[in-house]
Amino acid sequence: MPDRSSVDNVLWLIRLIPGCTFFLEGWQKFVYPDTLGVGRFVHLGIPHAAFWAPVTGVTEIVCGLLLIVGLFTRLSTLPLLIIMAVAFVYTKWPLLIHHGFLPMFHEYRTDFAMTLSLIFLWITGGGRLSLDYCWRRRT
């Protein structure tokens, strides 16, 4: 059976992976608005792209940072899971319909891993190496 510190280190890594990924993806929506921000949302046919692209970017930045430090870990996974679901509908569902499961899953593999890591964090929380844990111990 692994010791507690090993489990805490793994939880920290599982927080760090989606946290850094979402932070950087959100940041890029502002740095490259034509290809990853509003322009991409317009290209995908997302309604009100000029509104939703920056809202999505800010949400990814804020929730990504919250995951990195482990603050409001469970709560911060929920908006990110919604973003992942919308992204699936607009980017992967058409692949599934037109090309089948295997080509879709090839494109979805990273999103699938991110989604599972968010679900895992929603279930477990941030662990001992998180601000959530420090805050709970003080109250």
Image (cartoon, grey):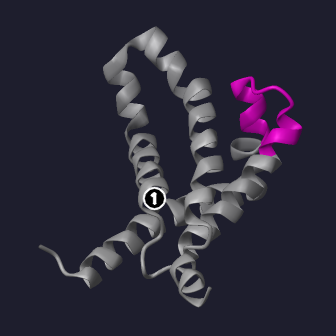
Comparing 28 with 9, the one in front is 9
Left or right, 1 with reference to 133: left
Indicate whether 75 appears above or below 97. Answer: below
Magenta region: which residues? Answer: 38-53
Query: Which class describes the residues within 10 Å of circle 1: few (<14), some (14-19), or many (20+)?
Result: many
| Foreground of the two, 8 or 40 | 8
Which quadrant, please, contains the C terminus? Answer: bottom right
Picture quadrant where residue 124 is located: bottom left
Q: Provide residue 72's location: percent of width, then percent of height.
A: 62, 67
For residue 67, side relative to residue 28 (left or right): left
Task: Please tell me which residue lies in front, 59 or 45.
Answer: 59
Which residue was labeled with disc 1? Answer: 121
Picture residue at 33% right of the left edge, 78% below the top: 9
Q: Is residue 102 above or below residue 34?
A: above
Q: Residue furthest bottom?
A: 138
Q: Residue at x 56, y 65 (%)?
A: 73
Can residue 91 be seen by looking at this rendering?
yes
Label the magenta part by its dominant secondary structure: helix
**Going 35% across and 32% down the picture, which residue do you hit?**
106
**Which residue reaches farthest top?**
98
